[in-house]
Amino acid sequence: MALCMLTGPGTIIQPCNIGLLDLAPTKNDELYIHQSNDDNRLFFYGDFSGFHSYLIVTHTKFRVIPESVKRTGYDCFQARIYFEDEDGNSVAQVVNFTSPLFPIRSVVACKYGRDFDSFELGLYDGQVSQKFACNLLFISSYAADLEAPIPVKVEYIGMAAKNGRTAQERLGEGHYKLQTVLGELDDRDLFRGVSIILYKPGELDCKEIEFPKVVETLEASLIQHFKPRPLNVEQLDFPNNRTKLTSMLKRVGANKIISHIESPSNTSLYSDHMPQPQQEHIIRLTVP
């Protein structure tokens, strides 16, 4: 019997916003807007329930060239942005963006840190301008014509499924591996950031395997594929290792596992072990 483990495109979340996921909507057509301060709002659109798998990833940051920013329509604008490829080489590209708010009357570059790394959108009808960080989430959601996907490096793979727990509950408790990744970047002061990609594993049409074991099998397959050492130390040799999980798979007659993971829009996943960034990874394993 072959087990097909499917998961759709991931949802990117910034580590600082993990605690807000409890406020996010749980239906596909719902929108929740969190007013984080006077000029910044965070948008949650769609169903944010059922995330049980997650990747902690690192990636380039983005810098906006102020004089390049211009409005090109009531719902779009253009900007030249700088970022780095996976080898640390500088890349510059003019990118067209769809606007998260519309109609817009103006758009300018602004700062949250020391560099121009955000956009300020001016609205009609006297509404207060809104600022949006030009981060991986923004690039993934609103960049319309990137020349190539942004490589994101898998640093850690985790899950939460037992007793109905979700990935956001696990991460919200204070995650040692996440703090490790954040701390290492701070120490080195690199032009890189950290994001979390949440996934919803699909159900299996196999009554012998309970859903928490589906999530665990997907996690083990991803760890075996990406091998994100040193933060992941278990399941690196899955399914050739002898664990309760492999014993369960043999008991139900599973001899093959096919796992599929898709990168969020405008991104491509890679790791030190799988150095070629790809927008989708198909993993085929044989259970001995």
Image (cartoon, rainbow, N blue to C red):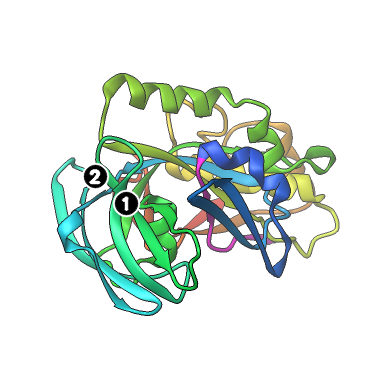
Q: Distance between the residues labelled 2 and 1?
A: 7 Å
Per the image, is 265 magenta? no
Say which amino acid is labelled 2: Glu
In the rendered view, does 218 fall on the left or right side of 22?
left
Q: Nearer the viewer, residue 19 or 182?
A: 19
Residue linked to disc 1 = 151
**Within-10-Å neighbours for mark 2: few <14, some 14–19, many 20+:** some
User: Residue 79: horizontal and vertical position, in percent?
Assistant: 23, 64
Q: Is residue 12 above or below residue 125?
A: above
Q: Position of residue 251 (x, y in %)?
A: 79, 46
Q: Is mark 1 on a helix, strand or loop?
A: strand
Question: Where's the N terminus, which quadrant?
Answer: bottom right
Q: Is mark 2 on a helix, strand or loop?
A: loop
The residue drawn where x is 57% and y is 34% is: 235
Q: Position of residue 212 (x, y in %)?
A: 77, 45
Taking 164 as reference, is 69 above or below it?
A: below
Residue 269 is marked as: none
Please give the residue where the numbered disc 2 appears in the rendered image: 86
Answer with left or right where residue 174 lies relative to residue 249: left
In-image side of 112 versus 258 (left or right): left
